[in-house]
């Protein structure tokens, strides 16, 4: 479906010889890619576990160079953990989807700012909540999501870390998110230092 939508938009741009429609098609490709990477893939990982890992390693993403194996394409870092510290009932409502995460990001903000990072206030997306994080070395999107309708106090939370890269960075392979990224190290340290947190899993190749 995504490919069909992009082909239609590209056809408009070519048919009308419109640079504006070409930019619209490019922006649509970026938006769809972010939806897949930030929303659908983490959900599939949580829902299908090992079966998803096997599928992900065998099938390339819908957009991107098929010749590069997945385990060589660092797109995002994920930190999964369980805790009863954050009660979704005390969060502002997510107007897009009933997915919690605002309290997790507010907690992370304090530790990140103490470490010298600048952050925005938490905002919503259809896959959860996010903040923008930056320092002198780069800027990132940090997302958080959890089951906002869970009936148990112990909730599994997922933190996503994505490095902002320009189109030129992507084309030239620059400014990639690496396995020892300092922001990942900082956030992992904050999570592991919290006494109520358990079952911490760090995926450096999501």
Image (spheres, rainbow, N blue to C red):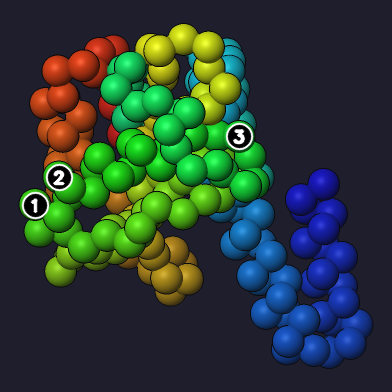
Which residue is at a point 20% across and 29% down the rendered structure image?
191
Q: In this view of the protein, which residue sits in the foreground, 84 or 115? A: 84
Task: Say few, some or many: other residues with alpha carbon within 10 Å of mark 2 (under 14 / 14 to 19 / 20 or more).
Answer: some
Task: Give the image quarter of residue 192.
Answer: top left
Report helix, strand or loop for mark 2.
Answer: helix
Q: Residue beneath label 2, please?
A: 111
Tell whether 148 sits left or right of 191: right
> Would you say the residues marked 2 and 1 are in contact, meaning their CB atoms lie under 8 Å apart?
yes
Which residue is at a point 16% across and 39% down the rendered structure image?
185
Quarter of the C terminus within the rendering: top left
Pick whichever of labels 2 and 3 is earlier in the sequence: 3
- State the image coordinates of residue 96 (x, y, percent, origin top left): 64, 46
Which residue is at a point 63% across and 39% down the rendered structure image?
97
The label shown at residue 114 is 1
Residue sitting farthest toward the front? 90
Report helix, strand or loop for mark 3.
Answer: loop
């Amino acid at each position: 479906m995504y490919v069909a939508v992009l082909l239609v938009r590209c056809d408009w741009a070519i048919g009308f010889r419109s640079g504006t429609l070409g930019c619209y098609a490019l922006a649509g490709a970026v938006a769809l890619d972010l939806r897949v990477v930030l929303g659908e893939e983490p959900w599939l990982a949580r829902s299908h576990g090992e079966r998803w890992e096997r599928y992900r390693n065998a099938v390339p993403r819908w957009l991107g160079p098929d010749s590069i194996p997945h385990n060589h394409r660092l797109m995002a870092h994920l930190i999964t953990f369980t805790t009863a510290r954050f009660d979704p009932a005390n969060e502002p409502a997510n107007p897009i989807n009933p997915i919690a995460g605002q309290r997790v990001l507010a907690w992370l903000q304090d530790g990140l700012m103490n470490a010298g990072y600048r952050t925005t206030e938490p905002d919503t997306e259809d896959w959860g909540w996010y903040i923008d994080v930056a320092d002198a070395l780069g800027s990132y999107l940090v997302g958080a999501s959890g089951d906002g309708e869970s009936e148990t106090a112990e909730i599994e939370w997922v933190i996503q870390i994505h490095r902002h890269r320009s189109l030129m960075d992507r084309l030239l392979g620059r400014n990639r998110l690496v396995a020892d990224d300092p922001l990942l190290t900082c956030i992992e340290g904050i999570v592991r230092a919290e006494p109520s947190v358990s079952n911490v899993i760090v995926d450096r190749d999501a």
